Every structure is written in structure tokens, then in C-alpha cells.
Image (cartoon, rainbow, N blue to C red):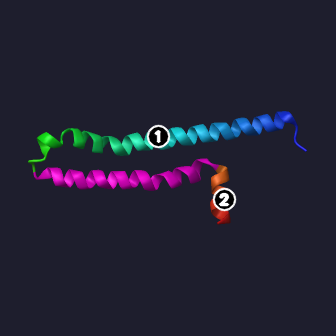
Amino acid sequence: MTTSAEQAAEAETLLKQITFMCVSVSFAFIIFITPSVILLIGKVHWQQYTMYSSMKAVNNLFVYCNHSINCYIYLLINKKFRKEMMRV
């Protein structure tokens, strides 16, 4: 049997892991999505240039990277998620 102090320590550790995971996912989102937002804001001015379509393609790649990196962040940070992935 675990004591209430051990349960509290385990709950606090889990809360720290989840908090760090959420902050990491949010930070990755900001990094990967910001260029797309900037390009969207400047679309009216930059659409006439040939480089715009290349930049749009690069920004789409960043968006896809943002979606794909979340799983790796979960695997690196969350021990429970890692265990469940190994089980599956």
C-alpha cells in the first residue's frame, strides 16, 4: 500500500510532466505556425512575387511538422504515454 505522501508526490510528478508537455507542444505550435501567420498577413503585398508560392510550400511543410512532432514530444516527456505506445 502506498501512503498519502507517496500518492501526493506521484500526483505532483505527473502534474509537472503534463505541464511541461503542454508547454512544449504550445511552444512548438508557436514556432511552426508563426511563419504561416506572417505569410497570411502579408499575402496581399507578397502574392505578386514568384517567391510567394515557394514560401507558401515551406510554410505548409512547417504546419505538417507541427502536427507530426506532437507525438514525439508526448513520447519524450510522458512516461505513461510511452508505456502505452510500447504496449500497443
Q: Residue 69: where, in percent of width, then height?
A: 46, 53
The amino acid type, in three-letter code, at marker 2 is: Glu
**What's drawn in magenta, residue-wise?**
50-78
Judge whether 70 appears above or below 40 on screen.
below
Horizontally, residue 23 falls left or right of residue 13, namely left
Name the residue at the left extreme. 48
Relative depth, front residue between 32 and 42? 42
Count of numbered marks = 2
Say which quarter of the image contains residue 37.
top left
Q: Quadrant of residue 64?
A: bottom left
- Which amino acid does the dot numbered 1 rest on? Ser
In terms of depth relative to the viewer, which is nearer, 41 or 8?
41
**In the rendered image, which residue does mark 2 sit on?**
84
Residue 41's place in the image compared with 51, above or below, is above
Q: Residue at x 13, y 47 (%)?
A: 47
Task: Decide whether the magenta segment is chiefly helix, strand or loop.
Answer: helix
Provide residue 6's location: percent of width, then percent of height.
Answer: 82, 37
Residue 2: mark: none
Left/right of residue 76 with respect to residue 67 in the rendered view? right
Q: Residue at x 9, y 48 (%)?
A: 49
Quadrant for the N terminus in the image: top right
The residue shown at (8%, 48%) is: 48
Q: Give the CA separation, mark 2 to mark 1.
A: 23 Å
Which residue is drawn at the image coordinates 39% and 40% (left, top)? 30
Number of other residues with Cα within 10 Å of mark 2, as a class: few under 14, some 14 to 19, many 20 or more: few
Asked if residue 48 lies left or right of residue 26, the reply is left
Residue 60: x %, y % from top left: 30, 54
Provide residue 86's location: percent of width, then percent of height.
65, 63
Q: Quadrant of the C terminus?
A: bottom right
Q: Which mark is residue 26?
A: 1
